Image (spheres, rainbow, N blue to C red):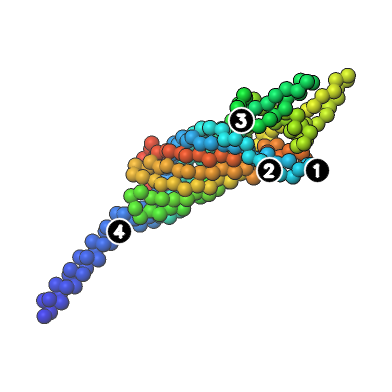
């Protein structure tokens, strides 16, 4: 009987030792350390702008048409714990909007927008940004495919822009939405568009979901919404929105750091 009890005790100790060893192999932080790594990523998506008109005629916001965009960057992950990590990253992203429709010209030569049917024009407004993000990543680290969510703050600097469509170029927008204001210079009198004087610096939120696969490959779906304004005029306020699908990988071996 004593031999049986000793055998049971021996098997129990072996089982505990095996489970402890297996857990230690699968647990990335069992040795009280964590991994730092660098990742490269690129993505494609769609962007739009929210145009708000806080005027005496109308107080409303409208989203412009979707503009295809792209971006790329590099991220650095640290404090890469079992369920949480911090990922600052820098990158390049396009934002903006597109607009299409049909217009006609009246007897005075004024362009009047008349609707979306039988389009005879299409304009793209593209803004190029350098971005600096600080993201928090919450993940499930118990499966080979590791789902996660990200949230954080984006700071950005406007590098360049290409504006094909001036939102005040049609008569109904000039006078109903007050997107232009009268200016005079010497003997010249005209209209000055409020779709101008773009902010060089802006900031916003980034939220998204993703899945990390083996060898550090990952795919993400993220949404970036401006908190600040591209244009902050009493008669016109403009904010950027962009949705991006991103793929990336870690081209370098993880570096383990003692905690």
* Mark 2 or 3: the one toward you: 3
Residue ID at (46%, 39%): 246
Residue ID at (23%, 61%): 18
Pointer 4 or 2: first along the chain: 4
Q: Nearer the viewer, residue 40 or 211?
A: 211
Q: Residues within 10 Å of mark 4 (few under 14, many from 20)?
A: few
Residue ID at (49%, 35%): 44
Judged left or right of residue 107, residue 154 is: left
Pointer 4 or 3: first along the chain: 4
Pointer 2 or 1: first along the chain: 1
> Which numbered circle lies on residue 47?
none
Q: Which residue is mark 2?
A: 61
Q: Quadrant of residue 121?
A: top right
**Callout 1: helix, strand or loop?**
loop
Judged left or right of residue 229, residue 3 is: left
Inter-mark Cα distance, 1 to 3: 30 Å
**Callout 3: helix, strand or loop?**
loop
Camera sees residue 33: no
Q: Which residue is mark 1?
A: 56
Q: Residues within 10 Å of mark 3 (few under 14, many from 20)?
A: few
Identify whether 7 is placed above or below 230. below
Question: Which quarter of the rendered picture does the N terminus lie within?
Answer: bottom left
* Mark 1 or 4: the one toward you: 1
């Amino acid at each position: 009987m004593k031999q049986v009890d000793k055998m049971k005790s021996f098997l129990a100790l072996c089982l505990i030792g095996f489970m402890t060893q297996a857990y230690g192999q699968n647990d990335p932080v069992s040795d009280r350390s964590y991994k730092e790594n660098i990742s490269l990523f690129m993505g494609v998506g769609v962007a739009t702008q929210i145009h708000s008109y806080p005027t005496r005629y109308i107080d409303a916001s409208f989203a412009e048409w979707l503009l295809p965009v792209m971006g790329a960057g590099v991220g650095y992950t640290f404090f890469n714990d079992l369920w949480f990590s911090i990922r600052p990253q820098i990158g390049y992203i396009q934002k903006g909007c597109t607009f299409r429709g049909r217009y006609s010209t009246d007897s005075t030569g004024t362009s009047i927008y008349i609707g979306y049917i039988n389009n005879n024009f299409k304009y793209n407004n593209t803004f190029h940004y350098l971005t600096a993000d600080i993201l928090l990543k919450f993940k499930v680290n118990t499966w080979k495919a590791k789902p996660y969510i990200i949230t954080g703050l984006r700071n950005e600097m406007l590098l360049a822009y290409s504006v094909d469509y001036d939102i005040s170029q049609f008569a109904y927008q000039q006078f109903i939405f007050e997107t232009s204001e009268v200016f005079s210079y010497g003997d010249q009198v005209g209209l000055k568009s409020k779709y101008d004087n773009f902010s060089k610096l802006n900031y916003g939120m980034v939220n998204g979901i993703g899945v990390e696969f083996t060898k550090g490959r990952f795919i993400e779906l993220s949404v970036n919404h401006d908190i600040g304004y591209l244009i902050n005029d009493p008669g016109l306020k403009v904010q950027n929105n962009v949705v991006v699908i991103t793929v990336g990988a870690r081209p370098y071996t993880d570096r383990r750091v003692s905690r």
